[in-house]
C-alpha cells in the first residue's frame, strides 16, 4: 500500500524558513516523479513543485520560484521542500503527491502538513 | 501560464441526477487532463486521467471526455458519496495548473 507521510509544518514568522519532508513507502520511490501541492484554507488546489525520479527535471509555480527548493533522497525514500522567505500567502496545507510516472498527474496523496505564516 | 476554468462553481443536485462539470483550458492541452474528487478534510483522490481514463477502483458512473481546450466530467447517476468538490488539472506544460473547483451540493 502506498503511504506518503508529510512532516515539518508549523507556525513560522514572515521572512523565515521551513523545511517540509515526505516519507514514502509501499512503492519503488526512485521509479516515480513526486510533487508538492498546497491548499490555502477554504481555497482550491495549487501545484507548488515537481521533481523527476532522478532530480533531472524540476518545475515550480511562479508564486514560489526563487524562494522554494524541491529535492529528493532516493536512498531514504524521501521528498523535501525547502521554503525560504515565507509570506502570509504561503499559509496552506501542503500535500506530498506521487506521480503516476514521469511528471504527469497525481495518483496518490499524503494527508498534508499545515504551514502557517504569521507574526 | 496555462489557465484552467471550471464551470459551474457550485452545483446543486439530487441523488440520481446526471451531473456534468466543464473544464476549459486557455490553450490546447491535447488530452493531458486529470480529474480529482476532494471531500471535506480529506486529501484529493484521482478519478480520471488522460481526459477519459478511469483510475482503478473508480465507479463506472464517472466518465470524462474532451480534447484540446474543452473537457467534461460526468456523473451518470449521482450517489450520496459523490457530494464533494471536483478539480480538473492539466499536465501538458509547466506549471501544472488546477481549475478553481466545482462543489457538488445536495439539492
Image: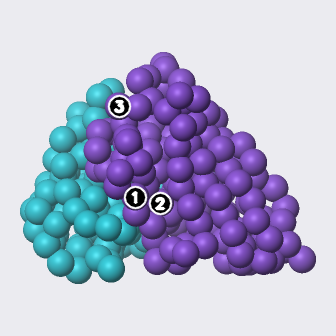
Chain colours: A purple, B cyan
The image position of residue B77, as x and y in percent, is: 28, 43
> Which residue position is annotated with label 1?
A58
Q: Residue at x 46, y 71 (%)?
A: A61
Q: Which mark is residue A31?
A: 3
The image position of residue A101, as x and y in percent, is: 29, 39
Closer to us: B10 or B47: B47
Give the letter of the chain under mark 2.
A
Q: Is residue A11 above or below residue B76?
A: below
Question: In the picture, residue A38 is in which quadrant?
Answer: bottom right
Closer to us: B69 or A30: A30
Q: Which mark is residue A93?
A: none
Give the letter of the chain under mark 1.
A
**Precedes in sequence: disc 2 or disc 1:** 2
Query: Cα distance, mark 2 to mark 3?
Result: 18 Å
The image position of residue B9, as x and y in percent, is: 42, 73
**Label 3 Cα crowd, 10 Å radius (few <14 / some 14-19 / many 20+):** some
Q: Residue at x 28, y 62 (%)?
A: B90
The secondary element bearing badge 2 is classed as: strand
> Which residue position is annotated with label 2?
A49
The secondary element bearing badge 1 is classed as: strand
**Precedes in sequence: disc 2 or disc 3:** 3
Q: Is residue B25 above or below residue B87?
A: below
Question: Are discs 2 and 1 less than 8 Å apart at CB?
Answer: yes
**Label 2 Cα crowd, 10 Å radius (few <14 / some 14-19 / many 20+):** many
Query: Cα distance, mark 3 to mark 1?
Result: 15 Å
The secondary element bearing badge 3 is classed as: helix
Give the letter of the chain under mark 3.
A
Q: Residue at x 23, y 73 (%)?
A: B24
Q: Quick check: do tags 3 and 1 share a chain?
A: yes
**Residue A43 horizontal side relative to residue A107, left or right:** right
Question: In the picture, residue A18 is in which quadrant?
Answer: bottom right
Amino acid at each position: 500500500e502506498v503511504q506518503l507521510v508529510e512532516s515539518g509544518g508549523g507556525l513560522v514568522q514572515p521572512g523565515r524558513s521551513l523545511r517540509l519532508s515526505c516519507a514514502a513507502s509501499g512503492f519503488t520511490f526512485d521509479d516515480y516523479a513526486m510533487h508538492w501541492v498546497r491548499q490555502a484554507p477554504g481555497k482550491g488546489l495549487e501545484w507548488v513543485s515537481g521533481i523527476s525520479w532522478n532530480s533531472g527535471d524540476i518545475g515550480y509555480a511562479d508564486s514560489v520560484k526563487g524562494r522554494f527548493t524541491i529535492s529528493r533522497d532516493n536512498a531514504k525514500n524521501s521528498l523535501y521542500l525547502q521554503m525560504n522567505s515565507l509570506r502570509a500567502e504561503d499559509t496552506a496545507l501542503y500535500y506530498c503527491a506521487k506521480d503516476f510516472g514521469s511528471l504527469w498527474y497525481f495518483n496518490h496523496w499524503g494527508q498534508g502538513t499545515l504551514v502557517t505564516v504569521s507574526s | 501560464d496555462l489557465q484552467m476554468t471550471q464551470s459551474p462553481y457550485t452545483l446543486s443536485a439530487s441523488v440520481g441526477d446526471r451531473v456534468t462539470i466543464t473544464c476549459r483550458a486557455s490553450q490546447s492541452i491535447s488530452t493531458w487532463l486529470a480529474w480529482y474528487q476532494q471531500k471535506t478534510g480529506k486529501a484529493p483522490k484521482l478519478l480520471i486521467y488522460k481526459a477519459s481514463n478511469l483510475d482503478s477502483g473508480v465507479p463506472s458512473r464517472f466518465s470524462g471526455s474532451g480534447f484540446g481546450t474543452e473537457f467534461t466530467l460526468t456523473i451518470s447517476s449521482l450517489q450520496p458519496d459523490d457530494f464533494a468538490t471536483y478539480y480538473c488539472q492539466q499536465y501538458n506544460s509547466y506549471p501544472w495548473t488546477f481549475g478553481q473547483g466545482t462543489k457538488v451540493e445536495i439539492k
